[in-house]
Image (tube, rainbow, N blue to C red):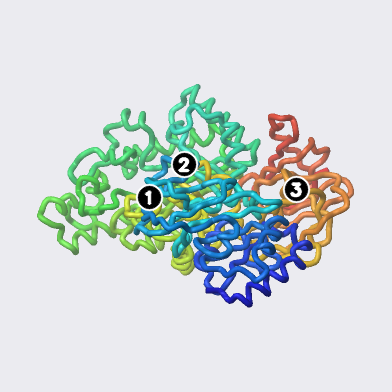
Amino acid sequence: MPSLRRIRSGLLSVALAFGATAQAATFSYHVLGDDHGSWPNILESIGLRPAALGPAGVLVAPRGTALPSAGGAEWAERVDRGAILVLEGESPVASSFGFVAGVGRVAVRGVEEVSAPKLEIVWEKAVTIPVFAIPQTARIFARERWQGAPLVAGFRQGRGAVLWVAASPGAQGYERFPYLPQALVALGLDPPFRSSRLWAFFDSSYRLRADPEYLAARWRASGIAALQVAAWHYWETEPERDAYLAKLIEACHRNLIHVYAWFELPHVSEQFWRDHPEWREKTAIGQDAHLDWRKLMNLTNRDAFMSVADGARSLLRRFDWDGVNLAELYFESLEGAANPARFTPMNADVRREFEEQEHFDPIELFRGASPEPARLKAFLDYRAGLARRQQEEWLGVVDGVRRERPELDLVLTHVDDRFDTTMREKIGADAARVLPLLADHSFTFLIEDPATIWHLGPKRYPQIAARYAPLTPHGEKLAIDINIVERYQDVYPTKQQTGTELFQLVREATNAFDRVALYFENSLMPRDLPLLGSAAAGVDRVERSGNKLVISSRHGVGVPWSGPALVDGKLWPIRGSGVVWLPAGLHAIDAGAQDPSLLMEDFGGTIMGAAATATGIQFAYRCDTRALAKLPRRPARIQVDGLPFTLPVSSTLPSGSGFVITLPRGQHLVVIE
């Protein structure tokens, strides 16, 4: 049980300190007592930082927290002044707010989230807890599925709120109540930070009836910076489909979202598969390689390669792309040679080439009871080398297009084979062979979580990063792709990552890698979207220093702010929609007396520094593709690196409230008036 003397002393300081720190209330938390449990995992997953009891805006009273001698008045006063008090289980403090354990008991295994009753939430082990009486004014967020006993509830009081949970959230913080962050937001918590650096994958076949303008605005509000669009749907020209994609790209650019053509070679398109049966890939039992949704083509064949390369060039020229993503360019399947019906490549060209090198046809490996180990190893080595050869070849194809369109960025999505070391034998993926290509090609190496480790916790991302660091000196080019999908393993409490588990995944990935991608935007649950940007904020430090808010972030961050702002003592010109956008590093924000002559409301790229001038704004940035800047009005003059910049304003916003301008790829100094 926490020390009663410590709690009394802390509460005594609250009334003296809170009035001066109310503006910082939602930036920090404090857990009473010595056993913090998993509450730091929960609260830090959405950007809150630990703080002393006095200035903390979210205060957690774990199970058994003692009531001070003065009764509950000091707790209630703290809440009235704006604090959010979190109460766990049965305690005198919980009872003082009306959450009282009854004599009845309930064994909890299944949980119903009131706002998502169809979502299956199952605890790994049943827990027997008292049935609590709760205040009539309390809103129930979660309850036991079969008997309806309240498990998570809360209410607003004064300027603050009280949130109560019936039991511990679990060792990691998401095993029992996945939506505690959302409950806090529903009770008035304003997420402390924002990020606009996430990538997301997009397949239009799931969104045919959705308005691109609506989607783009929602993506941007969720912190999405770039969209990886399934390009195989647009391989062949078709007026209606092409018009949809053009509209989608325009809507994304108006919302400062970059759009990448996402290829899944050796899958090309449904029509290409139908038109070219002679180029279809073969499995080890001689069947056409239609595996899962992908229909694989034989890109070793030179005629097939040239045809597909011409199609890719045509597709990249037809639309206003910002980049290209070459994804999963290796072989099938996750069962490896153990399943000949899914094992590729076994086309005639591969068999011929390999036989010339090793003097046996690799199809012989699958005609006996089990492959001879030395011969199988020889083919698996050849297969991994072939995958690397094809990846380099396709990087060259895209580089050829980039010579025409130098603004294009390039991404190579590659499944992890360092954490799950079986990937090389199963699908031919070998990062150690591919990463040296960064010396000759400029691209981002996007590491994809293999399905075999989807059930592991968020802490795997720092481990993955550590295993890739020795493989390349270009660590800034490493990124991570998180698969947000239903997992085939036994996982609890939900089959798909959501709520606190998702936010912890994003936070850990953000801290380990420069860029985080999510697969895919349609699988993300709507109730998770408002907090994604907070999970990705990457803030290491926040504290109040006098009237200033001091913040240190890894990649740059958005801070909720109302009115003019000074950053590091100077008038700051990058602010919009109630958010001040800061560069990476340590910065102090303070209130300013008046706005600068020109505000940049949002930016699609990485801000390195900025200053207000007498007539406009000056800023430095870097971006791997074209940068996008949102301004409240049409600029009169633009200079880039000291030279007049004549690229026209790219688009007015639908509301007529501003303009988006397009700036060149790379690192530049810009003056706008």
Front-most of residues 463 and 645: 463
CA neighbours of label 1 inside 10 A, class few (<14), some (14 to 19), many (20+): some
Front-most of residues 76 and 171: 76
Please tell me whether mark 1 sits on a helix, a strand or a loop: strand
CA neighbours of label 2 inside 10 A, class few (<14), some (14 to 19), many (20+): few
Comes first in the chain, label 3 or label 1:
1
Q: CA distance from mark 3 to mark 2?
A: 35 Å
Please tell me whether mark 3 sits on a helix, a strand or a loop: strand
Residue at left offset 49%, top offset 34%: 315
- Is residue 504 visible in the rendered image? The answer is no
CA neighbours of label 3 inside 10 A, class few (<14), some (14 to 19), many (20+): many
Task: List the residue tagged with mark 1.
Answer: 110
Tell which residue pokes out farthest to the front in this image: 103
> Is 334 left, or right, of 138 in this rendering?
left
Mark 3 touches mark 1? (CB < 8 Å):
no
Residue at left offset 69%, top offset 46%: 603
Front-most of residues 398 and 179: 179
Mark toward the viewer: 2 or 1: 1
Counting the numbered discs, the total is 3
Residue at left offset 55%, top offset 33%: 319
Q: Amino acid at mark 3?
A: Arg
Q: Amino acid at mark 2?
A: Ala
Q: Which mark is residue 116?
A: 2
Residue at left offset 88%, top offset 46%: 615
Q: Is residue 577 above or below residue 335?
A: above
- Is residue 285 visible in the rendered image? The answer is yes
